Amino acid sequence: MKFGVIVFPGSNCDLDAYHLVKDVLRKPVEYIWHQQNSLKGYDCLILPGGFSYGDYLRCGAIARFSPIMQEVVEFANRGGLVLGICNGFQILTEAGLLPGVLLRNQDLKFYCQFVHLKVENVNTPFTNFIEPQKILKIPIAHGDGNYYIDEKGLNSLLEKKQVIFRYATAEGVVSDEANPNGALFNIAGVISEKGNVLGMMPHPERAGETLLGSTDGLFIFQSLLNYLEKL
């Protein structure tokens, strides 16, 4: 299996994602510059966090038009696995690969801290290695993580079990106090209707080694490996 980490001007978590795949998971991985126009040979793509194009217009709005994104859309439409983290999540919503939008944090502050996530669906390529009811401890680092979708869209997400992660307390209680950014329904991550594209605001690549304070991010990557090995 082979991973690809897409690098946009302003990406700053590409190194973290690359390190986790190469040095922690010990799997093949390559950087993919945003001006490339081929994704041949990759099994899973990672759109990392950062500030693509400086976030000067709207987070992800410019990166969505980078040449590689046409290939990403086609890759996803063919069933390829795509993981968008933080800014990568924002880019995926701008590209129409995931529903909803990411707005400014409710109190307009930037948050860099650990949060706890309740896993709502463990039957996906990204969560199959996670035990039901397990609470994950994973860091966030964003100023635009306030997920929003209209009522019809939310009902559709819930009906199709596309809400994957919700902000919660360490005990798994979903509450306003556990919500760092005001996200609707405490949503921290959603998946595409086909189940092959996941976007999440927390950074699992920053929770892959004990030294970092948590290894819970590995559950997501181990789920991917488990899924790919069975194909």
Image: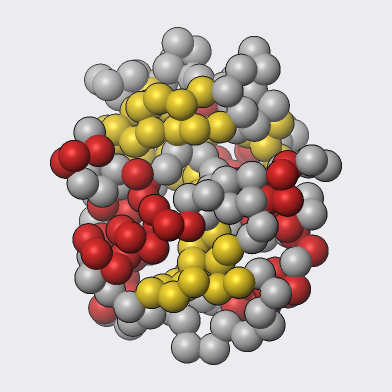
| Above or below for 201 versus 181 | below
Taking 47 as reference, is 35 left or right?
right
Residue for point 18% across, 39% down: 211
| Above or below for 24 versus 13 | below
Name the quarter where the N terminus is drawn. Answer: bottom left
Residue for point 22% across, 33% down: 213
Residue for point 42% across, 43% down: 203
Residue 108 rendering spot, x and y as whole percentages: 67, 17
Which residue ends up furthest to the bottom in the rendered image? Answer: 40
Taking 153 as reference, is 217 left or right?
left
Residue 206 rendering spot, x and y as whole percentages: 35, 44
Camera sees residue 186 = yes
* 117, 91: nearer the viewer: 91
Residue 41 rendering spot, x and y as whole percentages: 47, 88
Which residue ends up furthest to the left in the rendered image? Answer: 210
Residue for point 64% across, 51% down: 10
* 206, 231: nearer the viewer: 206
